[in-house]
Every structure is written in structure tokens, then in C-alpha cells.
Image (cartoon, rainbow, N blue to C red):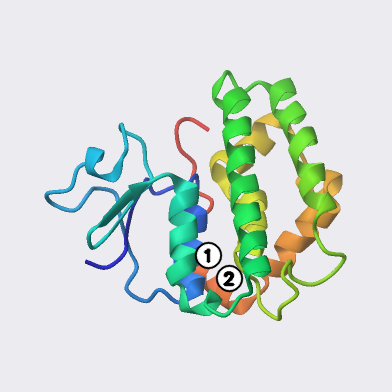
């Protein structure tokens, strides 16, 4: 079986997985909303949550672990150094930390103050470790760390929804972060990949 991601058709915890697969050159990657026949969520180690990934006899949950696995089998990233792979992994984890944190005030009544407190804690930290120019790993193409930044800035669920309900203007308040995302988004392969994903899809009344 080809690597198969099981997730909702929203950005959420699946968007970075999609981008890693599409831009990393995993040509047989598949996405669907239901598990393959004969596979259960429990087989993947999940008590009910998604995303899940099935790749032959590998059945797994946890979005960050799935991202790491997809990175490891993506031809585009095969020649990265251990330090570059470590940086990519760091940004995957930061993305997940921010997602988990911002979901609490967002889904807890669209709490504007709570959203802004979360944003003001997390986004300056991300800006602080971005390079002055160029992609994060110093290459002539974006790697997973750059895609994670794009996900944080552009993915509507839950990030864009949080910015909307928190009245957060990312471009104004975090110009370095926004500019980095714009640079990544302007790469032709990235723009093409984004068109085939539910980057801006809203859900859950958001």
C-alpha cells in the first residue's frame, strides 16, 4: 500500500504532512478521509483522533511523528545534513506546540484575549530564529521548516481562524514571519502544491 494519510479536508494537523509529501517527491502518496479496509484507529495507536498514516505494515498516529516519517522517505530531503534535518524537526514541533496552544482559546469561546496571549508568546519566538534572508536551512529551495512557517501563517484551520477571531494582523505585527511565508509561497512548486490542498477551508463554525 502507498503511504496513505487519513485526515479531515482542512489544514489543521494534516497540512504540513501533505506539503512534505507533495514537495518532497513522494509520488505515490494518497490522502483519504477514511481508513483502508481492515485497518482500525486502534491499529494505528489512536484512541480516536486523526491524522493517521498507513504505509504497508506501518500504521501510526501523531502528526509530528507522521511528519518526521514522511520527511525520512521524501527523496527531495534525502541529502540534508543531520543538522538541517534537526532544524526541520524543530519547526514541525514548534508548529504543533502553537497549534495545540491556540486551539484552547479558539475553541473555548473564541477568546480574543486568550488568542492574543498565545500569539504574543509564540510568534515572536519563531521570528527570532528565522534567518535575515533566504530559506531556513540555507539552501536554494524551501525545506520542511519553511513549510511549517507557511502553514502557521496561511493555514486557516486553526491558525487563520485564530487570527480572525483574535483580530490579529500577522503582516503588521509579525512582518518578518509574514515575509518569510510570502517568500516560501512564491516558489512555483509550493504554489502549485498549495492549490491541491484545503489550505483555506473553514470548519467547525470558524
| Residue 199 in view in this figure | yes
**Residue matched to label 1:** 194
| Residue 196 in view in this figure | no
**Residue in view at x 61 percent, y 66 percent:** 85
Density class for disc 1 (Cα within 10 Å; few <14, some 14-19, many ≥20) is some
Residue 98 horizontal/vertical position (percent): 64, 39
Residue 18 horizontal/vertical position (percent): 45, 60
- Is 115 or 98 nearer to us in this picture? 98
**Residue in view at x 18 percent, y 53 percent:** 36
**Residue in view at x 57 percent, y 30 percent:** 103
Q: Residue furthest right?
A: 132
Q: Residue furthest left?
A: 38
**What distance separates the C-alpha of mark 1 from that of mark 2?**
5 Å
* Vertical placement of residue 50 versus 134, above or below: above
**Residue matched to label 2:** 191
* Vertical placement of residue 83 versus 130, above or below: below
- Is 61 or 12 nearer to us in this picture? 61
Q: Along the horizontal axis of the image, is 27 left or right of 102?
A: left
Q: Residue furthest top?
A: 109
Density class for disc 2 (Cα within 10 Å; few <14, some 14-19, many ≥20) is few
**Residue in view at x 74 percent, y 66 percent:** 136
Quadrant position of the N terminus in the picture = bottom left
Number of the label disc, if any, that sits on residue 4: none
Q: Along the horizontal axis of the image, is 57 left or right of 205?
A: left
Cβ atoms under marks 1 and 2 closer than 8 Å: yes
Mark 1 falls on what kind of element? helix
Q: Along the horizontal axis of the image, is 46 left or right of 68?
A: left
Residue 6 horizontal/vertical position (percent): 32, 50
Mark 2 falls on what kind of element? helix
Residue 97 horizontal/vertical position (percent): 62, 39
Quadrant location of residue 5? bottom left
* Vertical placement of residue 196 versus 33, above or below: below
Amino acid at each position: 500500500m502507498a503511504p496513505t494519510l487519513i485526515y479531515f479536508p482542512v489544514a489543521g494537523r494534516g497540512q504540513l504532512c501533505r506539503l512534505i509529501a507533495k514537495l518532497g517527491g513522494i509520488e505515490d502518496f494518497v490522502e483519504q478521509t477514511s481508513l483502508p479496509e481492515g485497518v482500525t484507529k486502534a491499529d494505528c495507536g489512536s484512541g480516536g483522533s486523526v491524522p493517521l498514516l498507513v504505509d504497508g505494515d506501518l500504521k501510526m498516529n501523531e502528526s509530528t511523528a507522521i511528519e518526521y516519517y514522511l520527511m525520512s522517505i521524501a527523496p527531495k530531503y534525502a541529502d540534508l545534513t543531520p543538522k538541517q534535518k534537526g532544524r526541520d524537526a524543530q519547526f514541525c514541533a514548534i508548529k504543533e506546540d502553537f497549534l495545540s496552544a491556540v486551539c484552547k482559546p479558539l475553541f473555548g469561546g473564541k477568546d480574543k484575549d486568550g488568542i492574543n496571549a498565545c500569539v504574543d508568546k509564540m510568534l515572536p519566538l519563531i521570528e527570532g530564529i528565522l534567518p535575515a534572508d533566504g530559506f531556513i536551512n540555507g539552501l536554494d529551495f524551501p525545506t520542511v521548516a519553511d513549510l511549517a512557517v507557511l502553514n502557521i501563517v496561511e493555514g486557516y484551520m486553526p491558525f487563520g481562524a485564530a487570527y480572525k477571531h483574535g483580530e490579529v494582523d500577522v503582516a503588521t505585527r509579525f512582518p518578518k514571519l509574514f515575509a518569510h511565508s510570502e517568500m516560501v509561497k512564491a516558489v512555483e512548486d509550493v504554489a502549485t502544491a498549495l492549490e491541491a490542498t484545503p489550505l483555506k477551508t473553514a470548519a467547525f463554525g470558524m
